[in-house]
Amino acid sequence: MGTKSAIRAARKAQRRRGLTRSIQSQVKNSVAQAHQLLAAGNAAAAEAVQEAVRTLDKASGKGIIHPNTAGRHKSSLVRELNLKPGAK
């Protein structure tokens, strides 16, 4: 198999990968939901955008996604929200 430290490192990487995939999934789902609600003109779109921004900030702070990527997504969502009539 490998050395003791290699086995431990593989276990640790597997745990980290699971956590990272979970957070990435949350980010993708919240951003997609916000875009979907914005496109439909739903009244809950503003709350969905806030939730998406929150998850993007958390993922960025943990180093799971790059801060510039988070900023780009947040900017896109807020710009889309502000273009909607009766936003906020």
Image (tube, rainbow, N blue to C red):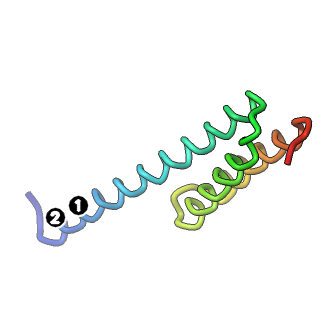
Label 2, secondary structure: give it.
Answer: helix
Quadrant in the rendering for residue 60: bottom right
Q: CA distance from mark 2 to mark 1?
A: 5 Å
Which amino acid, by three-letter code, is at mark 1?
Ala
The residue depicted at 65 percent of the width and 60 percent of the height is 67
Which amino acid, by three-letter code, is at mark 2?
Ile
Q: Relative to 55, is 22 on the left or the right?
A: left
Q: Is residue 68 above or below residue 12?
A: above
Give the camera-side residue of 44 and 77: 44
Q: Is residue 53 above or below residue 12?
A: above
Tell me the residue that label 1 is attached to: 10
Pointer 2 and pointer 1: residues touching (CB < 8 Å)?
yes
Q: Which mark is residue 76?
A: none
Please rate how many residues cluster around mark 2, counting C-alpha atoms within 10 Å: few if below 14, some from 14 to 19, many from 20: few
Quadrant in the rendering for residue 30: top right
Q: Which mark is residue 7?
A: 2
